[in-house]
Image: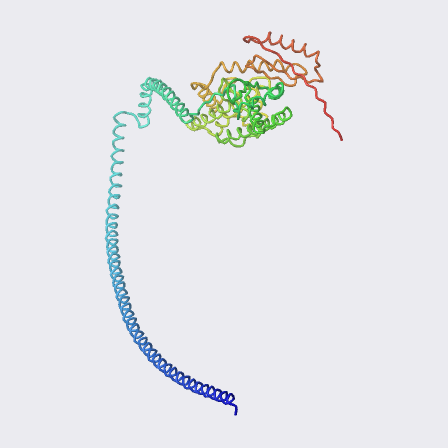
Amino acid sequence: MDPVIAIILIAAALIAGAAVGALVAYKKGVTAGVEQRKHEAETMVGSAEQQAARIVEDAEKDADNKKKSALIEAKDEIHKLRSEADKEIKDRRAELSRQERRMQQKEENLDKKTDNLEKKEDTLNQKIKSADEKLKEAESIKKSQMDILERISEFTKDQAKEYILSTLEDDLVHEKAVKVQAYEQLLKDECNEKARSYISLAIAKVAADQVSEAAVSVVPLPNDEMKGRIIGREGRNIRTLETLTGVDLIIDDTPEAITLSCFDQIRREVARIALEKLIADGRIHPTRIEEMVDKARREVEHRIKQEGERAVIETNVHGLNHELIKLLGRLKFRTSYRQNVLDHSIEVAQLCGVLASELGVDANMARRAGLLHDIGKALTSEIEGSHVQIGVDVCKKYNENPVVIHAVEAHHNDVEPRTVIACIVQAADAISAARPAARSENYESYIKRLQKLEEICTSYEGVDKCFAVQAGREVRIMVVPEVINDEKMVLVARQIAQQIETEMDYPGQIKVNLIRESRVSDYAK
């Protein structure tokens, strides 16, 4: 055999033997590890069983302890409830015993009172019987005495009575006259004192504040630049506003303000509202001015209605015709000797209610008459005649109560007052007008002069509107262009100026301005 091959075979045999030995050693190690792990697992299982048994035993002991504790607490609670129930029963029994004793005492007291009443009744019957016997005895004695007196005086009972009365009548005539005079004087003094008291009480209850309305209104501006926009190009905006409202706009050096001057408060209010709307809107031109003036007029008419309703609510007067309510609202923009006529009417109505309540007459009717007594002043600029006659006609037109109509007619003594309410309205009207600072005669004369100035101008044919401005130093007259042409305007202006000079007294001079404007409109269709 080749030695190389022999060596190879020997090496292969050695390798195979080593491999077999390693395999046998591995199997022995695996077997030993499995047996060791099995032993450890059995040991752990035995320990877990012991621990479980111990836990079960502890749980049973804990349950027994809790059961015993619960039984003890339940027994204690039952004992406590039983004790409380016994105590409550005992208290109720004691209360019942006390009530029984009280009832028994009350019955005994009632029995005693009944016995006392029976005894008193017996005593009272005896006293009544005794009183009847004494009354009969007194009647017998009286009759015997009257017989003796008739024999002595030789007069019967009726003759003696007639003689005494005739004698006393002569003696009492003088005393009656003296007493009558004394009572008359006393009644006069008491009436005067009560009248003063009632008037003082009425004035104290109706202490209304009197605010004098000014002849100007001030409209604030957001900035001085707004003045130029209100004036407009070549003054066309301010002329349009003055023409439409009849109010004089005074734009002076006063920062951020424009003054509106006019004696007519309604026109001044329309101009103020329209100007404020224009300032808020920002678009100021003649067409927009006309729209705002129309809106302002509608707002003022709505406010007039609201003021009338306010007056009715304040005075608690119900059932007035809605047209009368509107006329009352117009009085808000009417003054009499600088006293606001609506406030004056409300004050008079309240005074009438107080005075009527004190005198015991119908307070509701008195307040109604007081509220309507100056209703004619709302139409004095439209209807000829005194405000008394106008007020009477208006009240008759809307079927007012005859008592109210008579009070309106008599409140300035145009007719003799025939009712207590008419006298109350007279007194309340005088009280309201006579308060300090309530009226100013100079202001009223000024208003009447301006109204007279406008009346003269509107009396001419073809005059549409007329406004006195500049405190009466200027009058602006809008004419109907179809009636008065440019040539005739000169003649009309001269005639008006001559009539003003003839019929009016005024300081300085009055400028007469006639304004004629023609417009032609067409539509492209």
Q: Residue furthest right?
A: 525
Is residue 280 something one can see in this rendering? Answer: yes
Q: Which color scheme is applied?
A: rainbow
Q: Which residue lies furthest to the bottom in this view?
A: 1
Q: Which of 199 and 498 is in front in this view?
A: 498
Question: Where does the C terminus fall, quadrant-wise?
Answer: top right
Coordinates of residue 289 in the picture (x, y in percent): 62, 25
On the picture, is 143 further left or further right than 223?
A: left
Q: In this view, does 353 lie above or below 435?
A: below
Is residue 382 something one can see in this rendering? Answer: no
Q: Nearer the viewer, residue 310 or 180?
A: 310
Coordinates of residue 483 in the picture (x, y in percent): 71, 16
Q: Which of 500 and 262 is in front in this view?
A: 262
Res. 376 image quadrant: top right
Coordinates of residue 228 in the picture (x, y in percent): 58, 21
On the picture, is 354 further left or further right than 138?
A: right
Res. 471 image quadrant: top right
On the picture, is 178 further left or further right than 384?
A: left
On the picture, is 501 further left or further right than 443?
A: right
Coordinates of residue 415 in the picture (x, y in percent): 52, 18
| Tally of marks | 0
Res. 431 image quadrant: top left
Q: Nearer the viewer, residue 223 or 346?
A: 223
